[in-house]
């Protein structure tokens, strides 16, 4: 996976694995009791009726099925589903006898004895066989390293669509902070500034980047993935930085930029520019308590947009600590020298 050429510099995984066999009826019961955490990017059910029917058929006739890959969530003791949510949901829907859209779940294109049957139509013997069918699970124990787990997750998940880093963070570091970032991404002013429809969590990472650079830039090293992971993990329950503090700094900053410059503030050439976004957001957040004015910021914005040295800094490696610090310091110096 390519993280905008942001390379993983170190990830010695401290992860313990073990295997467990679960009867189907136990898995269904745990699904009903919400003992499984299914990450947001996995929640859509995509199997066709034929695929779902063949999976149930395999269990009924005793064929082996792929193992589920789970992680015991250290924060809730539930199971985080890394790979296998389509199978788990298929079992749940078959026992409920309907798909999410209300279509009855009747087995189709399966061997003759089972064709057209629902769970309740199965003979008692076949129902018992399905209930007792074993599905193997590979489980990562709750003693895993939450940072190292990020890299393991991106390699093991087989959803068919490569996961972006923020989707994995939202799964692994789920909590009040993750929910807050999602809520902030729905803000109308942010929507106007970002002005793109995004269902892959990319914009949530942009918000996280701003917050991490503003609150914790001194901890930044050359590995931005590790930096963002650690920042999100450290504050996953809003214990390090409060909800009010995060909301105030983010909302005040975007409201000022939007009111002063307009919805195209981060689009100098009709394309969203991440470096410009980070530079402006951090500067405004720092200067707002000092009564930053619209006329002053408008003059600075034009100066920055026309500054060739700033753009030369932006074209260099954008993730090294030296580059990030140089850009931030130059933008602040440019602002100071403007007066």
Image (cartoon, rainbow, N blue to C red):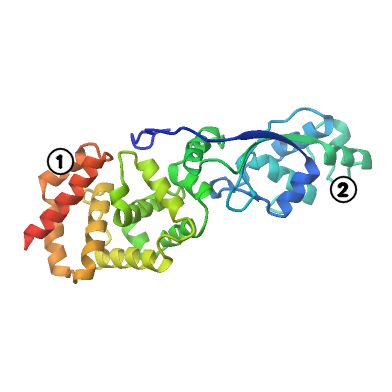
Q: Position of residue 159 (x, y in %)?
A: 56, 37
* Residue toward you, 251 or 72: 72
Q: Secondary structure at mark 1?
A: helix
Question: In 3D space, how far apart are the residues under numbered discs 2 and 1 (Cα atoms)?
Answer: 68 Å
Which residue occupies the foreground of this view, 99 or 134?
134
Residue at horizontal 39%, vertical 42%? 226
What secondary structure is found at the residue carrying circle 2?
loop
- Residue pictured at 63% horizontal, 45% vertical: 45
Asked if residue 93 can be seen in this view, the reply is no
* Res 32 visible: yes
Residue 263 appears in which quarter of the rendering? Answer: bottom left
Side of 217 relative to 49 (left or right):
left
User: Which of the image's four quarters has the C terminus?
Assistant: bottom left
Q: Position of residue 25 (x, y in %)?
A: 80, 45
Residue drawn where x is 53% and y is 47% of the image: 41
Up-down: is 60 above or below 201? above
Which residue bears the numbered disc 2? 120
Please determine whether, in this image, residue 197 is positioned above or below residue 320: below
Count neighbours of disc 1 (C-alpha within 10 A) and say few if under 14, some if 14 to 19, many if 20 or more.
few
Q: Nearer the viewer, residue 180 or 106?
A: 180
Marked residue nearer the N-terminal end (2 or 1): 2
Q: Is residue 125 left or right of residue 48?
A: right
Give how far across and how far down residue 285 sits, in percent: 26, 62
Residue 190, by quadrant, is bottom left
* Residue 249 relative to residue 336: left or right: right
Crowd around label 2: few <14 · some 14–19 · many ≥20 (10 Å):
few
Q: Residue 198 in the image: x percent, y percent?
A: 42, 51
With 200 as the anchor, is 111 left or right in this view?
right
Quadrant in which the N terminus appears: top left
Q: Which mark is residue 312?
A: 1
Nearest to the eye among marks 2 and 1: give it: 1
């Amino acid at each position: 996976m390519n993280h905008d050429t942001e390379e993983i510099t170190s990830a010695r995984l401290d992860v313990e694995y073990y295997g467990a066999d679960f009867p189907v009826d136990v898995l269904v019961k745990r699904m009903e009791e919400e003992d499984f955490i299914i990450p947001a990017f996995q929640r859509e059910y995509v199997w066709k009726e034929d695929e779902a029917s063949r999976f149930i058929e395999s269990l009924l006739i005793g064929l082996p099925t792929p193992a589920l890959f789970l992680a015991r969530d250290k924060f809730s003791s539930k199971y985080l589903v890394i790979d296998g949510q389509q199978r788990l949901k298929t079992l749940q829907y078959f026992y409920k006898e309907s798909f999410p859209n209300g279509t009855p779940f009747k087995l189709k294109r399966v061997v003759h004895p089972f064709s057209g049957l629902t769970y309740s139509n199965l003979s008692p013997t076949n129902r018992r066989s399905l209930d007792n069918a074993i599905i193997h699970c590979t489980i990562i124990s709750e003693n895993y390293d939450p940072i190292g787990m990020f890299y393991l997750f991106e390699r093991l998940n087989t959803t068919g669509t490569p996961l972006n880093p923020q989707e994995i963070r939202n799964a692994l570091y789920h909590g009040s902070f993750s929910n807050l970032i999602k809520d902030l991404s729905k803000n109308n002013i942010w929507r106007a500034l970002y002005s793109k429809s995004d269902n892959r969590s990319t914009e949530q990472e942009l918000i996280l980047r701003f917050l991490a650079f503003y609150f914790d830039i001194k901890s930044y090293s050359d590995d931005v993935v590790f930096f963002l992971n650690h920042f999100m993990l450290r504050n996953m329950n809003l214990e390090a930085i409060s909800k009010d503090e995060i909301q105030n700094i983010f909302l005040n900053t975007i409201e000022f930029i939007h009111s002063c410059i307009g919805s195209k503030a981060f689009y100098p050439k009709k394309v969203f520019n991440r470096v410009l976004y980070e530079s402006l957001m951090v500067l405004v957040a720092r200067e707002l308590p000092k009564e930053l004015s619209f006329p002053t910021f408008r003059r600075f914005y034009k100066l920055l947009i026309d500054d060739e040295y700033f753009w030369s800094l932006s074209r260099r490696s954008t993730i090294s600590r030296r580059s990030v610090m140089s850009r931030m310091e130059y933008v602040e110096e440019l602002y100071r020298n403007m007066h």
